[in-house]
Amino acid sequence: MKIYTKRGDAGQTDLFGGERVGKDELRVAAYGDVDELNSFVGAAAASGCDEALGETLQDIQSTLFDLGSSLATPDPAHREKYGIAGVAEADIVALEALIDRLEADLEELKTFILPGGSPSAAAFHVARTVCRRAERAVVRLAAIEGESVEQTSLRYLNRLSDALFVVARHENARQGVADVAWVGRTGGD
């Protein structure tokens, strides 16, 4: 099977279930942003991060793939018929457990911090901001009357951005790099 089909050359793509839509449709943008997020999580995982997080990060990537598949399948009946899992409540609980476990070893935050620090922490901060963009795209799609978006998808993306923030802080702490506190600048000459 060839990787190229030429079917998208005119700016359209197929949703799962057969519907043809423009590549600029909100649904396509939403699952595209989730796909981009998945790539950034993969890049962060490959950046020399804590090896103990490897399986967890792979689980997150698999869940993001499930989420994208759900978004690419607008008809809930098609999702059920073809066993498209989407995001389960257990996936959200797993993120909360990860956050709680990693936060237990971190200093309490008393101020906003600047994204960055170690290379792996910086990579997770980038993934976090891409996650927020994907979340905004899915929220926009969910707000359209008649569009089908599972509520667990919205909750998962919201929790995932928190988890990626905590993983970034964990990476800095693990490598002995202090988080940099944001200090507001005052105006003037």
Image: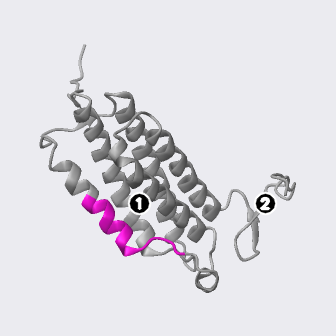
Disc 2 marks which amino acid? Answer: Gln
* Residue 95 shown in magenta: yes
In terms of sequence position, does the residue under pointer 1 or pointer 2 come before the other? 2
What residue is shown with label 2? 12
Q: Which residue is mark 1?
A: 157
In this view, 47 is above or below 102: above
- Residue farthest toward the top in the current orientation of the protein: 189
Is residue 181 in view from this perspective?
no
Residue 145 percent location from the top left of the image = 54, 78
Residue at the image point whose x is 76% and y is 75% from the top: 18
Q: Residue at x 69, y 56 (%)?
A: 24
Q: Which residues are magenta?
A: 85-97
In the picture shown, does residue 117 fall above or below 62? Answer: above
Percent x, y for residue 17?
72, 77
Up-down relation of residue 107 to residue 93 (above or below): above
SS state under label 2: strand
Secondary structure mostly seen in magenta is helix
Residue 88 lies in quadrant: bottom left
Q: The residue under label 1 is which amino acid type?
A: Leu
